[in-house]
Amino acid sequence: MTQQHASYGAVHGPPTGEITRRSFMRRVLGVGVGLLSLEFLGGTLAFLWPNLTEGLGSQITLGSADDINNQAPEWQNGLPFVYNQANLFFVNVPAAKARVAENSGGQVTSDVSLPVPDPGADVDPDIAPEDRSVMALWRKCPHLGCQVPQLCDRSEWFECLCHGSKYTVIGEKRDGPAPRGMDRFEVLVENGVYIVDTRQVISGPPPTVMTFDKRTASDITEHCVG
Amino acid sequence: MTIEKRPNATADKNVPTQAPERAPIIAPGVGPKLPGPPGVPGTERFRLLAYVKQESMVRVDKRPDETVLTWPHLLRAEFLMAMLITALLVVTSVFITAPLEEMANPSVTPHVAKAPWYFLGLQELLSYFNPTVAGVLIIPVYLGGLLIIPYVDRTPYKAVRDRKMIWIFFLCIMVGGLIVTFIGSFFRGPGWNWVWPWDGLYFNL
Amino acid sequence: MSNGNGGNPVVRWVKESAAWRSLFRQPYPSTSRTRALAVMNNVFLHLHPVRVKRHAVRYTYTFCLGGISFFLFLVLTVTGLYLMFFYVPSISRAYQDIQAIEASVAFGSLVRNMHRWAAHLMVLTVFLHMIRVFYHGAYKPPREFNWVVGVLLLFFTLALSFTGYLLPWDQIAFWAITVGTQMATYAPLLSNESAFFMLGGIEVGQGTLLRFYVAHVIFFPLIAAIFMIVHFWRIRKDGGISGPV
């Protein structure tokens, strides 16, 4: 090729497949600038990543079971404790199940073995987290983020005002447009004191999960919403 | 215009390919042949005549009334429009106050929580479909669909009958978007239940 | 230089001074030549070609929608700048600042209202502009890329409006942004992590307000302005606005 006379309109440069020093340098430069841009992007993301030290997004100490009972006496009767600073429902699971069973007119039966929250049992590694006696449910509706109000006293469900999503007392979705059950957080127990770890949000169960309170929306005659 | 063309050694010299169809073509070989570089066979030059299609804005046959001067014609139109919009804005702003409700309170959810009006169509659709499906389908179809319109519709024709498919797509997302935005804006109340506008308007600008 | 100055010696002195002539390099544009020069030699008017197609100045061809959108962007920049003097993006102060702007700043209520209504109007005119451009098939070659730039500008307009929507920190703002950002997490490639990044936290709060403020007053306006420059430049490079259908 090099012997032939260069003609009009010919591509100046090497034929495809051949790397000259010039094209090699150009590619190195391109890759270098690309890498630099990626590093800049990554650094920017890291720099701007939220750095949370308090409130939702950190570890929150709720207090012992007695502390909570003192603040909200209905907690031991099954009404979820509303912890406003971190937008949580702290559910006393056995008591809540008993409460629902009692108020459902026989539609729900509860076979709860733990009578009251037992911080000792809650740290037992043999008990799966979902079977422990307390739950920290996030009050943010997984549909579009509205705040979920306190348990509706007619249906014993959480009924979101915004778009009518409905959840059982342990956060399983039963009705409405939400894609899953209520999101929740891990609860740790240290020396009998409950600590909610809100650094990691645990997504709620899929809408098909039914472990407790298997009523459908039509089973219930009166709702608070819709 | 004269073009000097040098076909390479393997090409058929008898076909002057680049000339437009209607252009009178001087048959190959009619023009004077010129010698190519020494020692390379088959590189003789020949000349041909061709019409080149005019593409620039400066037409030879330009009629005198095809364009107008920017100053004053375009600038006057722009100035008048700017004044009209300014007047409209000032009058609107004097008489209609922007909404301001009570201070934000995360622990008090209003009975109706609506996104800004341009997202209400999406919010309405999210109440029909599983949000994951709706999100996966609607947002990319809308934004991505708009982006690729010029790369899908490659014909040069602009009349409606010549680009039916793209019109149907565009009308679907525009009219569909308009309808669901309207429903979401004016026909949805507490619990995202259907509410006629005369029974209560749940809409903020 | 003495066209129409009459005999007024002050006017003549001003117009013949070196300072005046350095500012205005030619007499008032009243002939075709000086009118062409006025457009060509001015950096702002140079956005336009010297001559435009006759149909391009018809109101009923463009309805001036693109121009109105750009003008509204300018109005929003000015009114937004004014509002910044009286606004602190803190959840304990923002709402009171808005109340103070409405109650005690001279013309404060007018400026805030103009900013809000111009913002809504701009979203509308950008949409209508896109529909107009589609109707005329103005995305056809060689204007494909400018259509893409335009769709991105629509996106930036929505982003500007959305980030500004939170700033009054009232109930409308708070819940609209809560719902809006939650919807965004359903989009592909966006997840809880991206919502966490956007909000500067798990829920709408101080981090969100500051983030949205910075995005609203500098990030998105800058990006939108850069894309507008490209948009206008490409209109000229692609041979002015498109012809009728």
Image: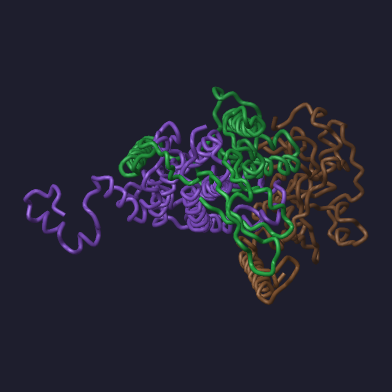
Q: Nearer the viewer, residue B185 or B32?
A: B32
Spot the green chain and give its letter: B
Scheme by which the image is coloured:
by chain
Which residue occupies 58% across, 59% down? C207
Count how many numbered circles sit on residues in the image.
Answer: 0
The colour of chain C is purple
Q: In the depicted view, which residue is nearer to us: B88 or A31? A: A31
Which residue occupies the extreme bottom position in the image?
A: A21
**Residue C82 x/y as whole percent:** 38, 53
Q: Is residue C118 left or right of residue A123?
A: left
Q: Residue A7 is drawn in which quadrant?
A: bottom right
Depicted B111 relative to depicted C21: above or below:
above
**Can I make out residue C169 in this image?**
no
The shade of chain A is brown
Compare residues C31 and A156 and report the one nearer the observer. C31
Where does the image place residue A88, in percent across and percent down from the top left?
Answer: 70, 51
Q: Residue B182 or A106: which is nearer the viewer? A: B182
Position of C75 compared to B196: left or right? left
| Residue at 90% across, 61% down | A124
For the N terminus of chain C, which image quadrant? bottom left
Residue B80 higher or lower than B103, as above or below:
above
Q: Position of residue C40 (x, y in %)?
A: 34, 53
Task: Give the side of residue A130 with respect to residue A79, left or right.
Answer: right
Give residue B25's position: percent from left, percent from top. 59, 44
Q: Is residue A18 visible?
A: yes
